[in-house]
Amino acid sequence: MDFKVEVNEYLPLRDVVFNTLRQAILTGELKPGERLMEIHLANRLGVSRTPIREAIRKLELEGLVIMVPRKGAEVAKITEKSMRDVLEVRKALEELAVCLACKRITDDKVEELREALEDFQKVVQTRNVTKITEADVHFHNIIFEVTNNQRLIHIIHNLGEQMYRYRLEYIKEEKYHGKIVKEHEAILEAIRRRDIESAVNSVSIHINNQEESILRSIKE
């Protein structure tokens, strides 16, 4: 394991440890099925077992860690069931979001969304998976923001950590980058035209393609 605690004076140690372990899981440094032994992790990160235990508990709530009888904690595997559960919810929320965005977006926000798309296209050229994923999140977050529905935004952000893992899995495959760019272009154009039907259809295609690609990866 190459990851280490990045000290942050503004965060409690338990949150720093949680963020460190979470990032290690999302990037694959801690692999699906790998056991999370408190003593080993505490020694590796130079902390006591208490923040490790607290972090593991939070990771379990997010679905990134599971508790196995007589074995303890391990990194949750990406299964077809867990993926479908998360993406079904994501699709429903994003279809609602683009529907509201078509009704409420301003010209200034359309331009902001266009700039986010351009940034995404530039970042794709770097082939940096983490940066591409963050740019993808930023593009979609602008859409959520313009819904002006705080309940919807709150629910989506609460699910964000679980959705992030599947975003990362999709973006790891460079062969899909061009397709993702085109899908973002279609979503932007539909919202720009305030075309609800096209926007909902574009988001549905976007998430269906993500699901199909991850499913192929799981089966391989």
Image (cartoon, rainbow, N blue to C red):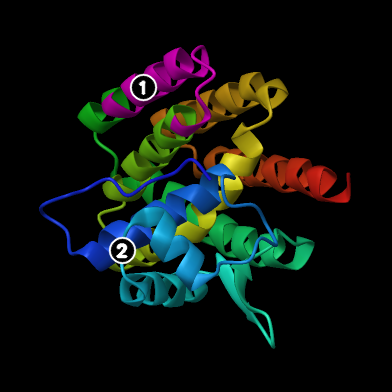
- For residue 174, above or below residue 6: above
Residue that appears at 75% across and 67% down: 81
Residue that appears at 72% across and 48% down: 211
**Location of residue 156 by image quarter:** bottom left
- What kind of residue is marked 1? Arg
Q: Which residues are magenta?
A: 112-130
**Location of residue 84 by image quarter:** bottom right
For residue 9, say whether it is visible.
yes
Around disc 2, counting alpha carbons within 10 Å, would you say few (fewer than 14), some (14 to 19), or many (20 or more)? some
Q: Nearer the viewer, residue 22 or 210?
A: 22
Question: Could you tell me what secondary structure mostly forms the magenta stretch?
Answer: helix
Q: Residue furthest left?
A: 10
Q: Which mark is residue 166?
A: none
Residue that appears at 43% across and 28% down: 131
Residue that appears at 49% across and 49% down: 24
Q: Residue 64: percent from the left, percent from the top?
A: 55, 64
For label 2, the residue is 47
For label 1, the residue is 114
Task: Indicate left or right for 31 with 121 as reference.
Answer: right
Q: Nearer the viewer, residue 177 or 144?
A: 177
Q: Residue 219: percent from the left, percent from the top?
A: 88, 50
Dot in front, 2 or 1? 2
Mark 2–mark 1 contact, CB under 8 Å?
A: no
Task: Indicate left or right for 63 with 138 as reference.
Answer: right
Task: Indicate left or right for 13 with 75 as reference.
Answer: left
**Location of residue 101 by image quarter:** top left
- For residue 203, above or below residue 152: above
Q: Which element carries disc 1, helix, strand or loop?
A: helix
